[in-house]
Image (tube, rainbow, N blue to C red):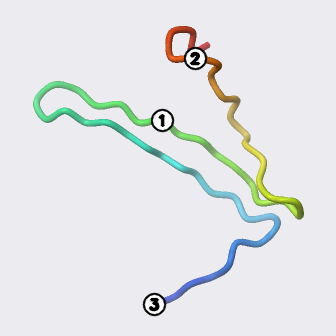
Amino acid sequence: RGNTLPLAPGMVFSDEPGIYIPGEFGIRLEDDMVITESGSELFTPQSESLEQPF
């Protein structure tokens, strides 16, 4: 519906999931990626675990 454009190689975008608890705190993760000929490639490295994020 509306304006739609298929993803194409060279396009860059971010995925930003978050958790927000009103009156307490919030956190948002940002994963930046580029569309390639064979799929997608993340610019930001993925954490191996929640306990050791860096």
Q: Is residue 16 left or right of residue 52?
A: left
Identity, as a three-letter code, of the amino acid under mark 1 = Leu
Q: Tell me the residue at 73%/43% (across/down).
A: 42
Q: Could you tell whether 35 is left or right of 25 in the image? A: right
| Quadrant holding the C terminus | top right
In this rendering, the answer to whether 12 lies above or below 49 is below
Residue 45 placed where, x, y %? 70, 29
Task: Tell whether 45 sits left or right of 51.
Answer: right
Q: Quadrant of residue 37?
A: bottom right
Q: Residue 13 in the image: state x and y as whole percent.
A: 62, 57
> Which amino acid lies under the numbered mark 3 shown in the image of this protein?
Gly
Sort mark 3 into few (<14), some (14-19) or many (20+) by Cα contacts within 10 Å: few
Q: Nearer the viewer, residue 1 or 24?
A: 1
Q: Which residue is mark 1?
A: 29
Secondary structure type for disc 3:
loop
Q: Of the residues tagged 3 and 2, which is closer to the observer?
A: 2
Disc with the residue nearer the chain's start (3 vs 2): 3
Q: Which residue is mark 2?
A: 49
Q: Which residue matches tag 3?
A: 2
